[in-house]
């Protein structure tokens, strides 16, 4: 795969559950820097941009050498932030993909990034590529904060939900014989479609599930899905820092 994909890390300070999250420290490095350095390890990424509306985050990112683009505080989502960056820099339209890497992924596997790009480029009719991993326990299956994905046998998304899908007459159960997948929140966009996506009207299923990708599907666009064996821990609350620290120590990542 040509080394022409661009990763953009949207980072905001005003997280509801964890204010200032990108600047939280893990073993002496900020969450944002650890995410950035993991993305740099992906061989299919030629450029990494941090997109933020906060001067504190800008100063931090520039301090460890990142390229930073200041975006509007009115952006409602990370995807809107990505689209603003692309609108400002037309050279990004020449990239084979624009990859949205969440800023709270300090342990993201570079191969997972590559998988999302491959999912996008596997079919010319696919507009977005993303990644899933098998769900291996009941707690994950029933957790509404873990998004589930149902896909076709050819690797295209059928649906995303906070509920356990697919269901059964007896109720979803990890021992039912069905393979359940959790969605990993990473997206590879065709650059021109990213700009289109930012203009799409909100949709009923998107509002019901509070899941942005359903907006693309309800408007008739196709999402390609790649599988990875494991998912790395992310940070949603201050309590997650301890779990991520243990994981980093066990993997010897930036230890």
Image (cartoon, rainbow, N blue to C red):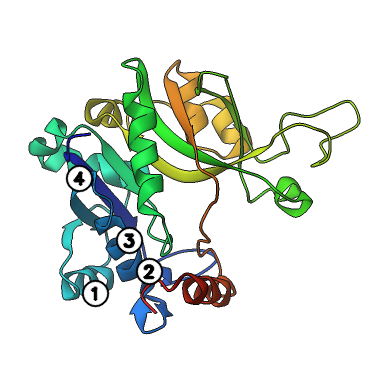
Helix, strand or loop at disc 3?
helix
Mark 1 crowdedness (10 Å alpha carbons): few <14, some 14-19, many ≥20: some
N-term-proximal mark, 4 vs 3: 3
- Identify which residue is drawn at 33% across, 35% down: 117
| Label 2 with label 1: CB-CB less than 8 Å | yes
Residue pointed to by mark 2: 22
Is 62 above or below relative to 130? below
* Label ID, residue 60: 1
| Label 3 with label 1: CB-CB less than 8 Å | no
Q: CA distance from mark 2 to mark 4?
A: 19 Å
Mark 4 crowdedness (10 Å alpha carbons): few <14, some 14-19, many ≥20: many
Q: CA distance from mark 2 to mark 1?
A: 9 Å
Decide if residue 253 is on the left or right side of residue 137.
Answer: left
User: Residue 53 placed where, x, y %?
Assistant: 27, 60
User: Residue 230 placed where, x, y %?
Assistant: 55, 50
| Label 4 with label 3: CB-CB less than 8 Å | no
- Closer to the camera, 22 or 123? 123
């Amino acid at each position: 795969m040509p080394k022409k994909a661009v990763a953009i890390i949207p980072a905001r300070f005003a997280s509801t559950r964890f204010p200032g999250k990108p600047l939280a420290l893990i073993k002496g490095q900020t969450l944002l820097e650890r995410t950035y350095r993991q993305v740099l390890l992906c061989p299919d990424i030629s450029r990494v941009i941090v997109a933020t509306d906060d001067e504190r985050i800008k100063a931090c990112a520039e301090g460890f050498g990142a390229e930073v683009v200041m975006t509007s505080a009115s952006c409602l989502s990370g995807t809107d932030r990505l689209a603003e960056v692309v609108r400002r820099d037309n050279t990004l339209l020449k990239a084979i993909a624009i990859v949205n890497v969440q800023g709270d992924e300090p342990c993201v596997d570079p191969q997972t990034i590559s998988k999302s790009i491959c999912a996008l480029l596997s079919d010319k009719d696919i507009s977005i590529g993303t990644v899933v991993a098998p769900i291996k326990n009941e707690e994950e299956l029933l957790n509404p904060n873990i998004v589930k994905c149902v896909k076709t046998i050819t690797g295209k998304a059928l649906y995303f939900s906070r509920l356990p899908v697919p269901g059964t007459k007896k109720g979803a159960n990890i021992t039912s014989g069905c393979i359940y997948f959790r969605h990993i929140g990473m997206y590879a966009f065709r650059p021109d479609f990213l700009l289109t996506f930012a203009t799409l009207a909100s949709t009923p299923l998107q509002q019901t599930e509070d899941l942005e990708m359903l907006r693309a599907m309800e408007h008739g666009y196709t999402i390609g899905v790649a599988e990875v064996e494991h998912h790395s821990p992310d940070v949603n609350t201050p309590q997650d820092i301890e779990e991520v620290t243990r994981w980093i120590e066990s993997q010897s990542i930036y230890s």
